[in-house]
Image (cartoon, helix red, strand yellow):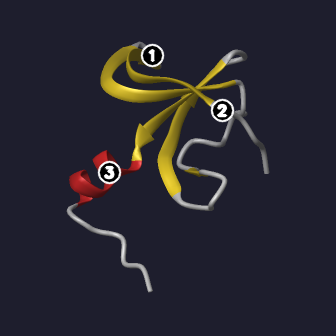
Amino acid sequence: YTTGQIIQIDVTVSVDYGGKIATFKNQLMAGAMSAGGDSGSAVLDMQKRVVGLLYAGSDTTTILNPIQFVLDALQVQLVTA
């Protein structure tokens, strides 16, 4: 369990995946709140709503894909009671 804050929205970031560079647009950037192995983690707001999917980080920042982008790509939707 870690905490952090979104520090920037609409970020364009390039991530090096072992020599292959992928560029992502309209991403969320948080402070240093992740560690190796955290990719794929859901990131929640203070009301426990999913806001993003963590996929990259460094000693200073963490990058999240906004959850609506993930849901759209998977062609699924959240169901709430």
Give the x, y percent position of residue 46. 66, 53
Disc 2 residue type (three-letter): Gln
Task: State whether residue 15 is above or below residue 48.
Answer: above
Per the image, label 2 sits on a secondary structure element best described as loop
Give the x, y percent position of residue 72. 23, 54
**Point 57% across, 42% down: residue:** 39
**Point 71% across, 35% down: residue:** 4
Per the image, label 3 sits on a secondary structure element best described as helix
Disc 1 residue type (three-letter): Asp
Task: State whether residue 24 is above or below residue 77.
Answer: above
Is 61 left, or right, of 73 in this rendering?
A: right
**Which residue is disc 2 drawn over?**
5
**Which residue is disc 3 drawn over?**
68
Q: Residue furthest front?
A: 47
Question: Sequence-wise, which precedes: disc 3 or disc 2?
Answer: 2
**Point 50% across, 36% down: residue:** 55
Q: Residue furthest right?
A: 1
- Determine which quarter of the picture holds residue 65: top left
Give the x, y percent position of residue 74. 25, 59
Disc 3 residue type (three-letter): Gln
Label 1 vs label 3: CA separation? 24 Å
- Determine which quarter of the picture holds residue 26: top left
- Could you tell me if the residues under marks 1 and 3 are in contact, i.e. CB atoms within 8 Å? no
Q: Are there few (<14), some (14-19), or many (20+) residues within 10 Å of tag 1?
A: few
- Determine which quarter of the picture holds residue 11: top left
Question: Sequence-wise, which precedes: disc 2 or disc 1?
Answer: 2
Label 2 vs label 1: CA separation? 24 Å
**Which tag is nearer the camera, tag 2 or tag 1?**
2
Of the numbered discs in the image, which one, if any, rests on residue 29?
none
Label 3 vs label 2: CA separation? 19 Å
Q: Are there few (<14), some (14-19), or many (20+) residues within 10 Å of tag 2?
A: few
Of the numbered discs in the image, which one, if any, rests on residue 16?
1
